[in-house]
Amino acid sequence: MSYQAKMRVWRGDIEGGALQDYSVEVNEGEVVLDIIHRLQQTQTGDLAVRWNCKAGKCGSCSAEINGRPRLLCMTRMSTFSETEVITVTPLRTFPVVRDLVTDVSYNYQKAREIPAFKPPKDLQPGEYRMAQEDVNRSQEFRKCIECFLCQNVCHVVRDHEENKEAYAGPRFLMRQAELDMHPLDVHGRRAEDAQEVHGLGYCNITKCCTEVCPEHIKITDNALIPMKERAADRKYDPVVWLGDKLFRRR
């Protein structure tokens, strides 16, 4: 059974824009991305939207639906009533390129700033050995599809443009935490770097990043809070400081 949905879609570019109203046919089982595609096909062929897999695994179709950051391809139309006006806008934290497409290059810049995995020099590929418990602990973080919804909703950068230079955001602080937990990584200063270089102290653990994650990664509880604890221990705990001196761990 089909019906006409009332859609309100943001149209414009970096110079400015406005919400425009449309009435679009909706069929059973469709998602918001289907409706955006039908809108392109039938009414406004120049509507810009970024997408790729349509299976919730590429992270390309991130947008805000009724003010909440979500994936267009994973948001079913059945979650809204037939009389509800559905508002689709671009991610607010990043500059608009055109319509629903935003410039997320900030995230790739931050990704390049995270030091790569550094195994022991005398350990060759194929000789890596890890306990299953360590594998399980970091495997959660590897589910990230880099949709950047967590980056978008984090108010540290969403409401304060000036923080972008000093703050890596939850996705890349999670990457630092993942590597810091890795038993074969010998970088040695990941917690300190997260605090001093990548702005871990800016995070005040509101858990908004966890709430919007489509992969249900517990970013705050399992990555950011433990990272904060390790950073504080290594900087202020006298026992840890003494151990570092005695065993030359730094």
Image (cartoon, helix red, strand yellow):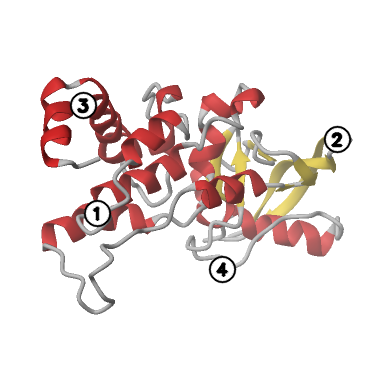
- Residue 174, percent from left and from top: 38, 44
Q: How far across and down, in percent of the image, does residue 84 sit?
A: 62, 36
As drawn, the label of residue 53 is 4
> Crowdedness of circle 3 by 10 Å Cα count: few (<14), some, many (20+)?
some
The amino acid beneath tag 1 is His
Residue indicated by mark 3: 233
Instruction: From the top left corner, tell me how far across and down residue 225 is, in percent.
Output: 28, 31
Task: Answer left or right for 103 relative to 178.
Answer: right
Dividing the picture into quadrants, the one containing residue 128 is: bottom left
Q: Which residue is drawn at 58% across and 28% down?
A: 157
Q: In which quarter of the image is residue 53?
A: bottom right
Amino acid found under the numbered disc labelled 4? Cys
- Callout 4 touching callout 3 (CB < 8 Å): no
| Secondary structure under the numbered disc 4 in the rendered image | loop
Task: Report the residue at 55% width, 30% height from top.
Answer: 166
Give the spatial CA distance, label 2 vs label 1.
46 Å
Along the horizontal axis of the image, is 84 left or right of 238?
A: right
At 77% from the left and 56% from the top, the residue drawn is 39
Q: Where is residue 66 in the image (x, y as percent from the top left)?
A: 60, 34
- Whichever of callouts 4 and 2 sits on the residue coming sooner in the sequence is 2
Label 1: state its secondary structure. Answer: loop
User: What residue is shown with label 1?
Assistant: 182
Quickly name the residue at label 2.
17
Q: Distance between the residues labelled 1 and 3?
A: 18 Å
Relative height, residue 151 to residue 195 (above, below): below
Disc 4 or disc 1, which is closer to the eye?
1
